[in-house]
Each structure stands twice: as structure tokens, then as C-alpha cells.
Image: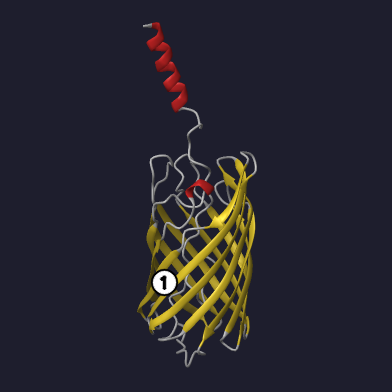
Amino acid sequence: MRILKIFVIFLILLMNTDIYAAPPQALPVNFRPIADTGGFTLFSTNTLEKNQLALEISADLIEPAGYNGKGLDQKTISYKLDYGLLDFIQVGVEIPYTWWQVDEVPFKSKGLDDINLGVKVKFLDESEYMPSIGAVGFISLTTGDKSKGLGTKRPDGGFKLIASKNLISSLSANINIGFIGVGRTSDIPLRNEFTYGAGIDYEIYKGLNAIAEIAGSTNRYIRQGVDPLEFFGGLRFSYYDIFYTSLGVRKGFNNASPDWGVLGSISFKWPKVKNIKAIKPAN
């Protein structure tokens, strides 16, 4: 009987240790369609024209982020290819490569992250008093190595509803609300996410825009009681409606968000946009 009690106590202690726990997980890379409007994490309803092709290289450097009270450094470079199926439907693929480490574990890794496939649809054009309406849907492929903390070997999938409006001739606004079905496993305590955000895009000068946005979500990590919330701000430069470059900073408001970071991108699209119909802003 005494041996049985010792064995039961041993099992209880073993279940409360991290001996067989899954490795730490890098922050997920969510799908971001290529666009010459919108923000860093928020989307506008604008899509590529039919048969238009876009390429992009983007980088996101986070130093550090809250990870259950531990410092997390993460750097991701993403390669993107988008195509305009129709004037209002855009499809794309995003291939991210991530370097990351958790300072206090310690844990360090790098490799191909989960590849994202996505589609962006514009349902309704903007009118004088109503915003344009669109949506983005995506699914992640399980290409990341779970042993390196890159994905869970279960696909994520989700969508964002988008509303965009020209407020005045040089100022536009975007609002996104979405849901992510998180791929969960028995060894990693995760839950689904609800996402939200709002931002503005101001044209300082022709070809130069200032971007500011606030974005947040419910926390996919069950053990964290705080939900991520961040500010993003920066500039976007455009050259002849073919090349686009953006550079910005991010700042978290709590321990569930990256403390700070730098992000940027270089985009190219071809052929050149033929015509953009301007919407007269409401008085």
C-alpha cells in the first residue's frame, strides 16, 4: 500500500513538471496580403487588378516579447506572391522564415515557418456616405517544425472583415474584425482568437503616406491572462505605382505584446495600375 501511495505521488509530480512539455512556441505569422494601401497589420479593401502580379519581401523584428514572463526575441522574413484573379479577387501565398529565442529558458531555433495561403475579396465599392466592404480568408500549411517551436503541426485558419473609407481627400481609415481558428494539440494549451484593429492612412505628399494603427486580439495562449494590444506607426513610399516601400515601428501596451519592434517591406507589382476611381469624400 505504501508503494502504491509513493507511485501515485510520483505521477502527480510528474504531471506538473515540464519534462515532457512541448518546446516553447514562436509567435505565429498571420497572412498579410500585398497592398499599396492599408496599414502594417490592418488591411484595406483594395485588391490587385485582374491579371496583376505582386511580389514582396517583408521583415518583422521583435525585441523582446512577453512569453509567460520570459523574454522572446523573434525575427521573421516573409516572401510573398499575390495575383489578381479578378478586379475584386486577389489570391496569395506567404512563405515566412523565422529566427527566434527565449532568453530565460534558454531556447533558440530557426527555420521555415508555416506557409500561409489566402484570398482577399472586395464585396462592395465605397460610396459617398458608406465605406467599401471586403474580407480576407486564410489557412496555414503545417510546414513549420514543431520541435523548433515553429507551428503545432495543426493548421490555423481564419478571416477578417474589412471596412475602408476616404474621410477627406488625403485621409482614409480602415477597420478590421476577425477570427482565427487555432490549430490545437493536447500538449500545447491554445484557444481560438478574435482579432480587431483600426487605423488611418494620411497622404503627406504624393508618394509619401503616414500610417498609424492600433491592433489587438484575444490571447491564443490559455495560460496568459492578458490579451495582446499594440500600436503601429510608420511611413509608406511609392514609386510610379510600381514599387512600394514601408518602414515602421511597433509598441506593445502590455506583457502579452511585443515590447517593441521594427517592421518593413519592399513590394513590386506589374503591370502598372490603369485607373483608380476616386470617391468624393462626404462633406
x and y percentages locating residue 3 in the rendered image: 40, 9
Between 267 and 227, the one lying in front of the other is 267
**Circle 1 residue:** 163
Image-quadrant location for residue 143: bottom left
Residue 104 picture location, percent across and down:
64, 39
Decide if residue 231 is on the left or right side of residue 49: right
| Residue 148 higher or lower than 158, as above or below | above
Residue at 46%, 74% in the rendered image: 44
Q: Nearer the viewer, residue 125 or 92?
A: 92
* Quadrant, the N terminus: top left
- Asked whether residue 42 is in view, the answer is no
x, y percent for residue 126: 40, 81
> What percent of the width, then of the height, locates residue 15?
44, 27
Give the residue drawn at x 57%, y 57%: 98
Residue drawn 49% across and 78% down? 167
Mark 1 is surrounded, within 10 Å at the Cα level, by few (under 14), some (14 to 19) or many (20 or more) other residues, namely: many
